[in-house]
């Protein structure tokens, strides 16, 4: 019983430290939350994600498999595999209201980070595009 209370206190403390910074961040989409327009954009982004995600996931899975085969058949050339993995696995998986309003691009094909060549970090739909 005492262990459960300690775990509960630790989890509550951890959550309270994370929730406040998350609430303090605002964007243009936050201004629409709680309105009919915000609800409509949320529903539209959910519907778009339901239609879009299976295609992107299948494309990424296929690219992962083909990239793995290319890695083996190219004599373990990582560059060859990355040329397949980066466009197929990276990119946008979830459609958000920012994508629907045009504030963020939808990238079916992923792009590598510019400063690291083709082996860089993937494009994240949650970070601003530079």
Image: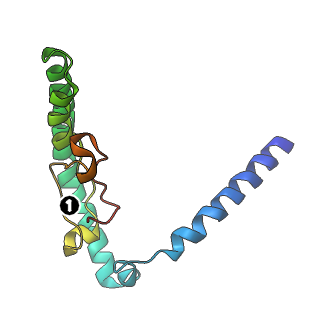
Placement of 118 over or under 76, stated as above or below:
below
With 24 as the anchor, is 50 left or right in this view? left
Secondary structure beneath label 1: helix
29 or 107, which is in the foreground?
A: 107
Mark 1, residues whose alpha carbon is within 10 Å: few (<14), some, or many (≥20)? some
Query: Which quarter of the image is occupied by the N terminus?
Result: top right
Placement of 51 over or under 3, stated as above or below:
below
Q: Is residue 92 visible?
A: no
Q: Quadrant of residue 51?
A: bottom left
Among all residues in the image, which is located at the extreme right? Answer: 2
Residue 109 image position (x, y, % from top left): 15, 49
Placement of 86 over or under 38, stated as above or below:
above
Q: Quadrant of residue 104?
A: bottom left
Seen at 22% across and 47% down, the residue is: 112
Judging by the rendered image, the residue that carries numbered circle 1 is 48
Residue 65 image position (x, y, % from top left): 19, 26
Residue 123 image position (x, y, % from top left): 27, 53
Q: Quadrant of residue 55?
A: top left
With 2 as the anchor, is 44 left or right in this view? left
Query: Which quarter of the image is occupied by the C terminus?
Result: bottom left
Among all residues in the image, which is located at the extreme front? Answer: 115
Residue 89 image position (x, y, % from top left): 23, 40
Seen at 16% across and 43% down, the residue is: 87
With 42 as the anchor, is 69 left or right in this view? left
Placement of 31 over or under 17, stated as above or below:
below
Seen at 22% across and 26% down, the residue is: 78
């Amino acid at each position: 019983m005492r262990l459960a209370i300690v775990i509960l206190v630790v989890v509550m403390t951890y959550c309270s430290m994370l929730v406040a910074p998350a609430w303090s961040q605002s964007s243009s989409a936050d201004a629409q939350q709680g309105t009919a327009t915000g609800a409509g954009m949320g529903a539209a982004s959910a519907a778009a994600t339901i239609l879009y995600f299976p295609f992107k996931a299948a494309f990424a899975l296929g690219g992962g498999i083909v990239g793995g085969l290319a890695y083996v058949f190219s004599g373990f050339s990582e560059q060859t595999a990355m040329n397949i993995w980066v466009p197929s696995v990276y990119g946008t998986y979830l459609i958000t209201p920012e994508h629907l309003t045009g504030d963020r691009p939808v990238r079916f094909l992923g792009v590598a980070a510019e400063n690291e060549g083709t082996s860089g970090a993937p494009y994240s739909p949650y970070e601003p595009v530079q």
